[in-house]
Image (spheres, rainbow, N blue to C red):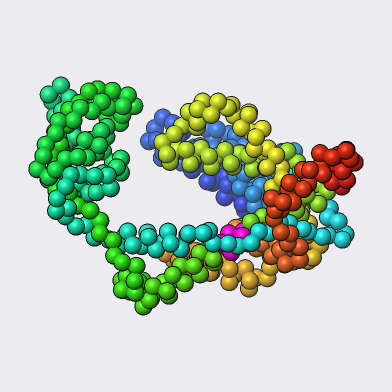
């Protein structure tokens, strides 16, 4: 698509004034302090054409972006921008932008969608697991009257570590409560407590890992003096009505159990609904006739790589380290991501084609209601909503809502298929291995 854009003369004048103020911050002219050079001196020093060229260079991206919003054009790649001449004083600026836009997908006239929709089921034992979790949280720590320390018990200890006789920085603590076997303490300190009695002290040798955090003691041999002061164990309440009243708003254990099962089923149904929507969208994409531009897949790949890099950085892992660890190059990773990126682009184009065919629109009232609902939890909900509704983002939100509504309709008309059973899979495999395997294979492909 080729856009012919005209920037009004007033906008050009404001752009030149802004650019001259910017240039004045860096321009050094004898007799003037830095940042205090008058505009007419900037113009005289640099020349009219140079100032205008800089103004156009600085403001062209914003003018192009505004033109896209005005023309409701969604580019899929960088534009080719061209202009014949810089504007003169008091003149508008004209340029053209050639942009790649998404192609239109073609859908079958008699569109029929089928996709697998599994049954929503609550995993066996989930209710009991949740009850045990609540029971564990409600348990209280009680002193162990007699005996030696065992795994799972809670030990109140004092410990102090040294390396070559010198105390380790932050390597000591008093009245430290640790559950034995939790792995919270370095080396074999926790393991050494097992079998001890309250009041007993042990000297524990510990070798710090080579990649241990404080480099001063990484890989070194240390000695910890550990004293067990007290042993405790968690005493769990009985699973009865009193327990239900203590951990929930329900008066009986039966009511609590029913609520856990209801919430688990709702969560399972929500998960199935999400998978169902994804399956329907995938089925729609498979029926679309369209050549996906490489730029659309490239954009999705770049976004996935950026997300991966941010996620790794939050865990303190460099992206290059991740590649070395997995034995892959960036090119290999891009090749792995491309099929799914192309499929997602095809699905988006197919969904837009369906929305166009069925005439789905989002009214201003619907858009405003959605934005105000989404921004209700913001610090300034009204201001945030007005900013979105009055800015270029409003149309992007409208487009997203339009596609969401299109998928809602597709989900309603699609035919759900049961997931294949183990018997069906085995039967199909046996059929394919028979004497008519070649014929059966060609038939199954259709």
Q: Residue at x 58, y 62 (%)?
A: 121
| Magenta span: chief secondary structure | helix
| Count of picture labels | 0
Q: Residue at x 57, y 38 (%)?
A: 305
Q: Nearer the viewer, residue 129 or 8?
A: 129
Tell me: 202 left or right of 418.
Answer: left
| Residue 298, x across and y down, in percent | 67, 38
Residue 47 in the image: above or below residue 126: above
Q: Is residue 300 magenta?
A: no
Q: Residue at x 51, y 69 (%)?
A: 262
Q: Nearer the viewer, residue 133 or 215?
A: 133
Q: Nearer the viewer, residue 232 or 12?
A: 232
Tell me: 380 left or right of 136.
Answer: right
Residue 124 in the image: above or below residue 64: below
Single out the residue that lies furthest toward the bottom. Answer: 251
Residue 31 in the image: above or below residue 257: above
Q: Is residue 271 magenta?
A: yes
Residue 366 in the image: above or below residue 280: below
| Residue 336, x across and y down, in percent | 65, 34
Single out the residue that lies furthest toward the left. Answer: 199
Q: Residue at x 69, y 65 (%)?
A: 408
| Residue 354, x across and y down, in percent | 78, 59
Res. 399 visible in picture? no
Q: Nearer the viewer, residue 426 or 413?
A: 426
| Residue 413, x across and y down, in percent | 76, 66
Res. 298 visible in picture? yes
Q: Which residues are magenta?
A: 268-274
Tell me: 345 left or right of 106.
Answer: left
Residue 249, quarter of picture:
bottom left
């Amino acid at each position: 698509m080729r856009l012919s854009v005209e920037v009004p003369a007033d906008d050009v004048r404001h752009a030149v004034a802004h650019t001259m103020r910017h240039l004045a911050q860096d321009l050094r002219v004898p007799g003037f302090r830095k940042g205090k050079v008058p505009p007419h001196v900037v113009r005289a020093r640099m020349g009219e054409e140079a100032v205008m060229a800089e103004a156009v260079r600085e403001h062209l991206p914003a003018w192009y972006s505004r033109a896209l919003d005005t023309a409701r054009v969604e580019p899929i790649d960088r534009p080719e921008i061209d202009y014949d001449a810089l504007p003169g004083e008091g003149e508008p600026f004209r340029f053209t932008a050639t942009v790649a836009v998404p192609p239109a997908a073609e859908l079958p006239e008699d569109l029929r969608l089928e996709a697998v929709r599994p049954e929503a089921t609550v995993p066996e034992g989930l209710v009991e697991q949740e009850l045990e979790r609540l029971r564990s949280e409600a348990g209280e720590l009680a002193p162990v009257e007699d005996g030696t320390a065992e795994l799972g018990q809670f030990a109140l200890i004092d410990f102090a570590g040294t390396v070559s006789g010198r105390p380790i920085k932050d390597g000591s603590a008093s009245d430290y409560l640790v559950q034995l076997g939790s792995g919270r303490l370095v080396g074999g300190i926790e393991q050494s407590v097992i079998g001890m009695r309250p009041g007993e002290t042990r000297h524990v040798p510990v070798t710090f890992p080579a990649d241990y955090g404080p480099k001063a003691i990484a890989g070194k041999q240390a000695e910890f003096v550990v004293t067990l002061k007290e042993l405790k164990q968690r005493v769990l309440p009985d699973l009865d009505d009193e327990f239900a009243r203590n951990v929930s708003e329900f008066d009986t254990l039966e009511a609590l159990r029913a609520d856990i099962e209801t919430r688990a089923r709702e969560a399972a149904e929500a998960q199935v609904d999400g998978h169902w929507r994804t399956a329907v969208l995938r089925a729609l994409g498979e029926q679309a006739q369209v050549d996906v531009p490489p730029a659309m897949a490239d954009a999705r790949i770049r976004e996935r790589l950026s997300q991966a890099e941010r996620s790794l950085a939050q865990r303190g892992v460099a992206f290059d380290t991740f590649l070395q660890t997995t034995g892959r190059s960036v090119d290999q990773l891009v090749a792995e991501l491309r099929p799914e990126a192309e499929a997602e682009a095809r699905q988006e184009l197919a969904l837009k084609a369906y929305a166009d065919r069925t005439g789905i629109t989002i009214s201003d009232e619907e858009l405003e209601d959605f934005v105000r609902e989404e921004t209700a939890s913001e610090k300034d909900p009204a201001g945030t909503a007005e900013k979105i509704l009055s800015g270029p983002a409003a149309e992007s939100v409208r487009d997203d809502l339009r596609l969401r509504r299109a998928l809602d309709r597709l989900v309603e008309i699609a035919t759900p298929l049961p997931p294949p059973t183990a018997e069906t899979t085995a039967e199909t495999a046996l059929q394919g291995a028979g004497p008519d395997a070649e014929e059966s294979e060609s038939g199954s492909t259709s």
